[in-house]
Structures are given as C-alpha cells and as structure tokens.
Amino acid sequence: MKKVLFVLIVAVFLSSCTKDNSAKGSYVAKIDSVKITWEDVRAEMDALPPMAKEFFQGPEGAARFVDEIVKKELLYLETKKRGLDKDKDFKRKVEEFKKITLINQILEKEIEAAGKDISDKEIRDYYEQNKDEFTVNTKVRLSHIVLKTDDEAKKAYERLQEGADFAKLAMELSTDKSSAKAGGDLGFFSRGEMTPELEEAAFSLRKGETSRPVKLKSGIHILKVTDAKGNVVEFDKVKDILGQRMAAERQRESFDKFIESLKKSYKIEINKEAVSKLDFGAPQQNKDK
C-alpha cells in the first residue's frame, strides 16, 4: 500500500508544471503569498491517470490531494530559496528538456501525419504481393555449410553477407563432404526432424534467407532455406500489425527525407580531428594534454 501511495504522490508532483500565481478564483490553500486556487487543483486532477484519480475520490481523498499539492509547492519554493533554479546543471537540464520537447513537436507536425493516411487497400495490396512474409512454415528445404572453428564460420558468414554464392561456398568450405557435393543441400525437413538448435534457426528463416552460425558438437552450421511450404496467415489476423508496420516505415521514410532537406538548408561542418579523439569506451580524459 505504501508503494502505491508513493507512486500516486509522484504522479501528483509530476502532473503539471508550476502554476501561474495570477490564476483566478478563491484559493484552496496559501503558502506565504503563493495561492493554490480551485482552478489549479482541477487542472492537476485532470492531468492524473485514472488509477490515481480513483485514490483521491470523496472529501477525504480531495483533502489528501490538496495536501500533496501543498507538499509539491513547498518543495518548489524551497528549491528557489536555496537558489537551485540558478544551478548550471539545472539550467542545462531545462534547456535539454526544451530541446527535446520542441523536437517532438516538429516531428509530430512533419512526420507523424505521414503514417496516418494508409488505406485498407494499400495494406491488402502489400499482403497479396508479399504472402511469403505471412507464411508459417511447416516444411523447409535446407542447405548448410559446416565449419570447424568460430573464425572460419565468421569469415564464411561475412562472405555470404557480401554476396557470395551459398552453394559454391558450401562446395569450397563445408566439412560435410556428402552435402557439399550438392552445394550443401539437405532436402526437406519438418518440425521434430532436427536438433532443437537447428530447428529453431531453420524455422525462423524465410525462403532465401541465411542464418547466423549455429554452434553444435558436430561443428558450426550456417543454414539457408532454399524452399519452404506452409500455411498463409489470414489477412484479418495480420491487418492491424501490418498497418502499424507500414505506418512506421512510411514515417521513417518521411523522417529521412525531412532530415535530408534540412541538411541542404544549413551549413554542417564535422571536425574530423576532434571526432577521431573521441573514445566513449575509455575513461574520460583530455586527450590534448
């Protein structure tokens, strides 16, 4: 109960910015010359989450709520008395808060709207054109490359990421000579026919995708799904998630375009020498000394 009460008190403290003392109406409480009006109390109550509002219902709850507001005001007045509002670190934090708030406003204005105009037809069209993405595989055709060491597997994986042909690499590098002759091809597998580690990796891939190296006692395996069979998830079951994903992608594209347009409007200079001296992994020190 004490923990819940503490959370509610914090909610009251953070529910609104400090009020303007010129607020109209008779005061509910007064601390020195600072008045807390009915309008102040109502504004702070409106800013609370539903759970907190329930805690302060009724005459006794209202009295507790006013008491919490008084505590907040006392703390604020004490910070000013001690000059904490003039502290350099405080001013820096205020400026940072202003910066983030203003950035959020411009992003809301310029970016968020980009994801709000996606039609049901656009979502349906994407679904129809990309059904592989919404297929739950029941059988997969696998190819693999088996290597001995972590270093060998890392180098092979990097070559695949750079565009190397999987079958040719299997014939060149795989220690499983029988499958290497066929470019690493192993045929079709259903669930339950492989070791758990390989099954998890294989059935997390879509057709054409390659896994990261999987370490087993028999060696380090890199898998590729060359074909897959399964059931397509119905459109209605993925419509909302797909719509959200498309909205996020459209917002990202809008953000990138907006940033590119800003770069053309401002002169940007990067001090490469200063950047080269940055090292966030090491203890902070002045490298010019």
Image: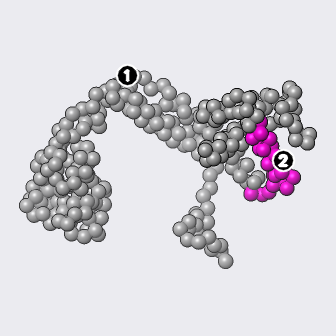
What's the amino acid at mark 1?
A: Lys
**139 relative position to 275: left or right:** left
Residue 18 quadrant:
top right
What's the amino acid at mark 2?
A: Leu
Nearest to the observer: residue 139 or residue 7: 7
Nearest to the observer: residue 80 or residue 225: 80
- Separation of disc 2 and disc 1 at Cα? 57 Å
Mark 1 falls on what kind of element? helix
Magenta stretch, overall SS = helix
Residue 214 visible in rendering: yes
Relative to 281, does residue 267 appear above or below in the rendering? above
Q: Position of residue 88 (x, y in %)?
A: 78, 57
**269 relative position to 145: left or right:** right
Question: Residue at position x 25%, y 51% from top?
Answer: 200
Question: Residue at position x 61%, y 47% from top?
Answer: 3
**227 relative position to 101: left or right:** left
Q: Position of residue 217 (x, y in %)?
A: 20, 66
Residue placed under numbered mark 1 in the picture = 121
Q: Is residue 70 magenta?
A: yes
Q: Residue furthest bottom?
A: 289
Question: Residue at position x 23%, y 43% from top?
Answer: 207
The label on residue 257 is none
Question: Residue at position x 88%, y 41% from top?
Answer: 31
Number of callouts in the render? 2
Relative to 70, does residue 166 appear above or below in the rendering? below
Residue 54 quadrant:
top right
Q: For label 1, count other residues whose C-alpha is less than 10 Å away and answer few (under 14), some (14-19) or many (20+).
A: few
**Magenta residues, as a range?**
66-89
Q: For label 2, count other residues whose C-alpha is less than 10 Å away and answer few (under 14), some (14-19) or many (20+).
A: some
* Quarter containing the N terminus: top right
**288 relative position to 233: left or right:** right
Residue placed under numbered mark 2 in the picture = 77
